[in-house]
Amino acid sequence: MESIIILIFIIGYLSITLEHPLKLDKTVPALIMAALIWAVLAVGFYSGWFDVINTEEQAFNFLKGGEHAEEGFNGTLLHHLGKTAEILIFLIGAMTIVEIIDLHRGFEVLKGAVKTKSKKKLLWIIGILAFFLSAIIDNLTATIVLVTLLRKLIHTREDRIWYAAMVVIAANAGGAWSPIGDVTTTMLWIANKVTAAGLIEFVVIPSIVCFILPFFVASYLKPFRGNIEVDAEEDMEAEKLLSSRTMLFLGLGMIVSVPVFKTLTHLPPYMGMMLALGVVWLVSEYIHPEEDFSKERRHLYSAHKALSRIEISSILFFLGILMAVAGLESLVYGVVHGEEVGTLRYLAEVLREAIPNLDVVVMLLGVLSAIIDNVPLVAASIGMFESPTDSVLWHFIAYSAGTGGSMLIIGSAAGVAAMGMERIDFIWYLKKVAWLAFIGFAAGAGVFLLIERVIFHHA
């Protein structure tokens, strides 16, 4: 039965990675995989074929059969559902705030920062915006915002796809050092593997290197030489609107306040995001664009409209993949150091024996995140390793999983968004941009290991 569960996971995982050839939304196999894994777990557990680890007390296994065992199994399922729900509620809140800002045309204010016709200067302006914006509103949203901005600034698609590809590199690098910059860092943060301050301390410098080096090299390439016709006057009235500026700064400020709220109250991050969403929602009920303040059109700027625009399919994908990984984590698979452990912990021990250098394992995780989705990889790593909060391991995983996906256009949510919006060809990205992303990833990883060994070991 254990083999059946692992087979279900492998088939589901392959279906997710082959989303484009199969022309099947990855949410479908994720949901089916999670449901089937827990169904087999339940049937096997109640039939007395195998045990499930009690997540509340890792060293204790439920005895086969009996009322207490049934309560324990249900408790384990609810425990994992609760942990998953924390991430989903956090993401729903963040996505809704971003949509409210967009409805009020807040992101159009960013066009004021772009006042150049130089291709090289425009590259750096867009890159810096992507790097810092992704740390605030996450890399996926930052990519969508900036690709939309590029469409208004650059009318030639051949030029625009180069900028869009570089946005992916900058956004992934920027999201890696922020607890709200990427789904994977959010997962590590909510799981208490990293703190906001620790993540910034360890990862921000490698992320800057990962961003700057590819952009420095790209600025000397032919596509970024010369000048470009930038129509910076179009829609500039949005910059002057009080509602646009108010909602932009309020929304971004409330998202940034979430780590502060967690530090002050010690409550889970999703509680801070609920407060942030409530405040932004409250203000959005009374502030609308000045030229469109009619009661009849007020619903066009409401949070209800914003909620209808968030990608529920992405939320359901995270639900499916995280619950599937939780099922593997809960299944007793082997014995390590005299303790019965789940499938993922057992896999971690096998990896350690095969590749003794943990740094190589984590860098391999980064390379794999370019090929397959980094969300399940990080979810698996949380179950595989037991290092303390803010250990070097977790920060290196955050960096590798966050930036490694840039090496392929399908390797990150930001890349997939840019690919869909600008119809960027997979092979074109592989030939033209992948090497830039690789040198950034490798250089950043080298800087991370150098800082960790030279500075922190001597501190």
Image: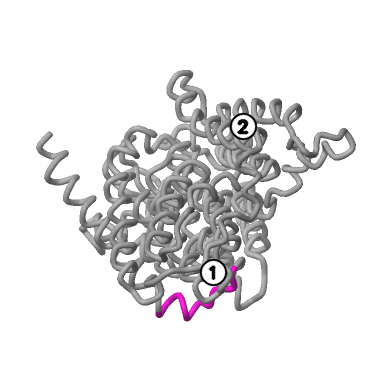
Q: Position of residue 239 (x, y in %)?
A: 60, 42
Mark closer to the chain start, 1 or 2:
1
Q: Is residue 4 visible?
A: no
Residue 155 lies in the magenta-colored region: no
Q: Which residue lies under the disc numbered 2?
A: 246
Return the residue nearer the eye: 177 or 383: 177
Residue that appears at 25% across and 55% down: 358
313 is higher (above) or lower (below) than 439: above
Q: Position of residue 317 (x, y in %)?
A: 62, 55
Residue that appears at 47% across and 66% down: 163
Residue neighbourhood size for the residue with mark 2, other residues' Cα within 10 Å, grouped as few (<14), some (14–19), many (≥20): some
- Residue 17: which disc? 1
Q: Magenta span: helix, strand or loop, mainly?
A: helix
Q: Secondary structure at mark 2?
A: helix
Q: Secondary structure at mark 1?
A: helix
Q: Quadrant of residue 218?
A: bottom left
Callout 1 amino acid: Thr
- Residue 109: which disc? none
In three-dimensional space, the C-alpha distance between marks 1 and 2, rounded to whole angstroms, equals 41 Å
| Residue reaching furthest to the top | 265
Return the residue nearer the eye: 224 or 117: 117
Q: Is residue 299 visible?
A: yes
Q: Quadrant of residue 346?
A: bottom left
Specify the segment rendered in magenta.
Answer: 422-431
Q: Is residue 8 left or right of residue 393?
A: right
Assign the N terminus to one quadrant of the image: bottom right
18 is higher (above) or lower (below) than 58: below
